Amino acid sequence: MNRNLRAAALFLCAAMAMPAAGPAAKPKLVVTIVLDQFRYDYLLRFRGDYNAGLAKLLEGGAVFSDAHYLHATTVTAVGHSTYLSGATPSVSGIIANEWFDRETNTTVTSVSDKTTKVVGGVPGAMGSSPNRLLVSTVADELKMRNPQSHVIGVSIKDRGAILPAGHMADAAYWYDPDSNRWVTSTYFREALPEWVAALNGEKTYQKFLGASWLPFDAGPAGQAKPFCTMTAGAEARYCGSLEATPWGNEMIEEFAERAIAGEKLGGHETTDILTVSFSSNDYVGHAVGPDDPAVRDISIRTDRLLGKFFQYIDQRVGLGNTLIVLTADHGVVPVPEVNQARHMPGGRLNEIQVTDRITKALTARFGPGKWLMTASPLMPYLNQELIRKLKLDPALVENVAADAVREMPHIARVYTRHELQHGEVQRDQIGDAVSLSFFGPRAGDLVILPEPYYLFEATGTSHGTPYDYDNHVPLIFFGAGIKPGMYRNKVAMNDVAPTLSAILDVEAPSGSIGRVLAEILQ
């Protein structure tokens, strides 16, 4: 036997003697965390201030530095419906937080459902459900494979709780400010479980009434100016609601802990999933913008709060039995006045001017009438009934309206329904992003894109564009079976769902277009 054959035989014998490698153990609990309106650069800008939860993920997780949403409409509902479905709005049907429904001639939200009622809140109030989500999520695929798995969604916002958890969730819970209670809807269950009712009975919100939000690293009492206060008429800015303070996040974290205990998450024979969306970062960011000290402060507090949450998970389930995924649903544009002060582009646009220009242009060309059904500044809906009545070519009407808006200053592009339906758009990253956001049965007749750093809001700031500051978000996987490190290859947020599906050994969600991030799997 020659040397090569002898070596091969020895290797084969050794391999046969070794025990066969079994399938990797699946996590007992998957916890997905969305920080609502958390730009990727917050991880970099405030890194020196993190020493708890975010620090743990950054030091021990698989960190993607170049993760982006592919769609253009970077808002809460779309982000939350994307990362665990892997689908784009063009497939999922979740095109915005709300849109005009042509069948009912009303504005609907991404989760509104008139066939349901709120459970635990104001009696008789309309509930919410995932009925408008046209695709499955990772949690749905897991439940179809393993019905005994438990899936719970938690957020202050109904859409933040419902859309990631999906159609088959055991429950989704959100905070109802009208009743100051945690609620769900009859889509999920007819009554609140005892542990939720008990938490509502504690009325934890009361301890924040009249409180002031002071900087995390404030000096002695009285020396630091509060960011805002829960007392109306005070010298400091009025916070407005608990949602717009770090205390809103504290309430979410407390609820998440109670959910783990109350639902025995991580204690079943199969994997359970808990989706948690921290909403308060978004409320604060809208009010003051990404460069305000309050954003740094709530980011630090988020780090500490996640540290507390991870400690609880470790004690209850064990971090070694848990897979954590952290991301955000979108970023945010700097406040225009801040940008102008540092000689950067940016400004505020007037949505009434958009409405007036469209109406005047269509009236001049086709005659008077109610040409607009809704005044959404970024996605106007034309009066299709009037167009049919006058026997007009819809594509021509759209073009007249689009040309009127294109003449306005600081409007980068205007797309028409006809162009998007027929793929007649500029084939670059922006054009692709707008196309991936278009779902014909629900979309408006125009899509208006301002120039970078320009927005229609009269105060504060916002998001919702395909620009980098809106679509570049954190993405971190942490847990057993994950290779820690910094991954600098560009990835899409649509990759999260197929990656989790591969880890859980279930089918990828029905609308998923992403790939498995095999590079992080051990």
Image (spheres, grey):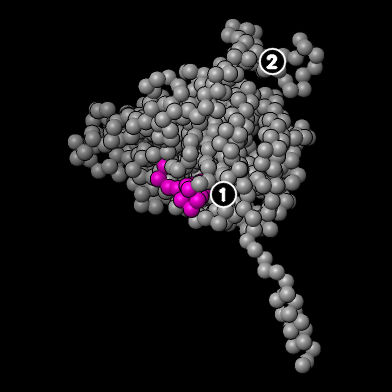
Residue 141 against residue 231 in the figure, above or below: below
Please name the residue shown 59% across and 14% down the image.
206
Q: Can you give x and y, in whole percent of width and height, for residue 254 in the image? A: 62, 28
Q: Quadrant of residue 226?
A: top right
Quadrant showing the N terminus: bottom right
Q: Quadrant of residue 168?
A: top left
Q: Can you give x and y, in whole percent of width and height, for residue 446 in the image? A: 38, 39
Label pair 1/2, CB-CB below 8 angstroms = no
The residue segment tinted magenta is 133-147
Q: Can you give x and y, in whole percent of width and height, for residue 455 in the image? A: 52, 30
Q: Earlier in the sequence, mark 1 or mark 2?
A: 2
Please name the residue shown 78% across and 92% down the image.
2
Residue tagged 2: 226
Residue lying furthest bottom: 1
- Relative to the observer, which residue lies in front, 191 or 451? 191
Magenta segment: does it hold 450? no
Magenta segment: does it hold 143? yes
- Identify which amino acid the numbered label 2 is placed on: Pro
Q: Nearer the viewer, mark 1 or mark 2?
A: 1
Residue tagged 1: 270
Say what secondary structure mark 2 lies in. loop
